[in-house]
Amino acid sequence: MNIQKYQKIKHEIPENVRLIAVSKTKPESDILQLYELGQRIFGENKAQELKQKHENLPKDIAWHFIGHLQTNKIKYIIPFVHLIHSIDSFNLLKEVNKQALKNNRQVSCLLQFHVATEETKYGFSFQEAVEMLQNPEFENLKNVSIVGIMGMASLTDDRSQIRREFSTLYSFFEKLKATYFKGKDSFKEISMGMTDDYDIAIEEGATLIRVGSAIFGERNYNI
């Protein structure tokens, strides 16, 4: 746990950018340490682990789900999740809406776009997202609110490539805002940038950055 690094990041980022402390695989004691310093937004990528942490930790934590979400795991997080970053298919969004309806909630979501070179990363192409937004079924999803977009850059040392990919993501945001979310103040979030590239992401328009290992150390895959 690197408290100095956390405080440095908090000091450096602009006021319009919020830090998500990515606490996946990390013990609740680490989360509480940051909570005591005022951090309230935490990110997790396993539904059942997130459910457990939510039950055990302070209720004013805003939990963000940042990993690939399986439809059969949605029910674990819908009662309390603050924001789902990883909507990467129409079917997933419909299932989130269904579970949110059961819980009498409207759940905020980000559309995840694939802007990286790696095929392993999830996300819509721009055209796929447009097709979903134009589908009459989309209008019937009253229990979800699309509040922005998310994407991950390629895992590369080429910072100019990372910048291009974040710039592409920002251009997607602007096109969607102008065409499908015009006048909707809630559509305002761009989640991009992690430990190694959040500085570029901020320069390219990020409103949410997801930082884990810089704060918590390398993640524990044995949990």
Image (cartoon, helix red, strand yellow):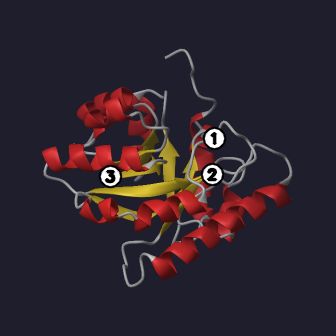
Marker disc for residue 21: none
State which tag comes first along the sequence, 2 or 3. 3
Q: Is residue 33 left or right of residue 115?
A: left
Residue depicted at 58% across the width and 43% down the height: 122
Identify the secondary structure beneath mark 1: loop
Identity, as a three-letter code, of the amino acid under mark 3: His
Q: Residue at x 66, y 47 (%)?
A: 195
Along the line of sight, the residue nearer the viewer: 170 or 132: 132
Q: Nearer the viewer, mark 3 or mark 1?
A: 1
- Determine the secondary structure under disc 3: loop
Q: Determine contact: label 1, label 2, CB under 8 Å.
A: yes
Q: Position of residue 15 (x, y in %)?
A: 52, 72
Residue placed at 76% from the left, 47% from the top?
117
Q: Secondary structure at mark 2?
A: loop
Task: Name the outermost residue toward the front.
Answer: 136
Task: Tell which residue pokes out farthest to the top in this image.
Answer: 222
Quick one: 223 or 57, which is closer to the camera? 223
The residue to which callout 3 is attached is 82
Mark 3 and mark 1 residues within 8 Å of each other at the beta carbon: no
Question: CA–CA distance between discs 3 and 1?
Answer: 23 Å
The residue to which callout 1 is attached is 121
Q: Which residue is mark 2?
A: 114
